[in-house]
Image: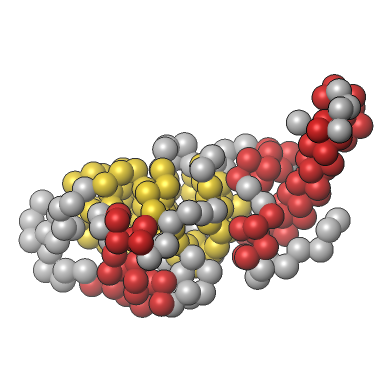
Amino acid sequence: MTPVDLHDFAWMRRALYTAVVADVLDSLALRDQVVGVELRLVSGSGPLAGRAKTTLWQDLESADPRPYDLELKAVDECHTDDVLIAAAGGSMRSGVWGELLSTAVRNRGCAGAIVDGAVRDVAKMHEMGFTVFARGTCPRDSLHRQRVTAVDVPVEIGGVRICPGDLVLADLDGIVVVPRAVERDALARAWEKVTAENRTRDEILAGTKAADVFRKYGVL
């Protein structure tokens, strides 16, 4: 199989896309690795690829005794090519992510954020080119409304379990999570499939019938 550099996230963003990775995971009997809720691209341009830095959120019914405590811990612990995951259970109660947090994690090399909830400061985040996928937007501050309860723990978004360090890819088609146990095999197979798809496209453009090309390469 094609050699894969698991540290070359620039290559992953340039060469791979979620649909082909999802196909490969299907072939490995991992058929439920695509996030099953719509998290749309709200800022930046994507695609996004990196290691999951997970945060678990909850709604509050009373004043937060330690505002922003754990979310700032998560932000300050981010590393290059991390993807900040905010598992907020789809809550739209407040914008849990915004410009200043984006600025802080980007300075630490973070590739982007995926928020199962609402974000704010979208124009500012878009202006700075920081890639964020989210359920939607809300201008309210998270103070005394929502807070991080845990960092670097397994979380779930849209039926998909995301563990710290899992490979996460996101683009306009959606979000796919690659478990660490299969990532090398999955990425090698994905690159081989991309190569076959490129050949398929070239031959169709040259006039070969789609059915004939499918019989030749087995991809569609």
Asked if 90 appears above or below 204 in the picture, the reply is below
The reply to whether residue 85 is visible in this rendering is no
The reply to whether residue 198 is visible in this rendering is yes
Asked if 182 appears above or below 175 in the picture, the reply is below
81 horizontally vs 119: left or right: right
Asked if 46 appears above or below 210 in the picture, the reply is below
- The residue lying at 46 percent from left, 69 percent from top is 110
Instruction: Locate residue 151: give its quadrant.
Output: bottom left
Instruction: Locate residue 4: give its quadrant.
Output: bottom right
Q: Residue furthest front?
A: 206
In the rendered image, residue 172, in percent from the top left (x then y), is placed at: 51, 43
In the rendered image, residue 85, in percent from the top left (x then y), is placed at: 41, 58
- The residue lying at 12 percent from left, 59 percent from top is 144
78 horizontally vs 68: left or right: right
In the rendered image, residue 201, in percent from the top left (x then y), is placed at: 79, 36
Q: Residue furthest left?
A: 63
Q: Name the image quarter holding the C terminus.
A: top right
Instruction: Locate residue 181: give its quadrant.
Output: bottom right
Q: Name the image quarter holding the N terminus.
A: bottom right
In the rendered image, residue 45, in percent from the top left (x then y), is placed at: 48, 54
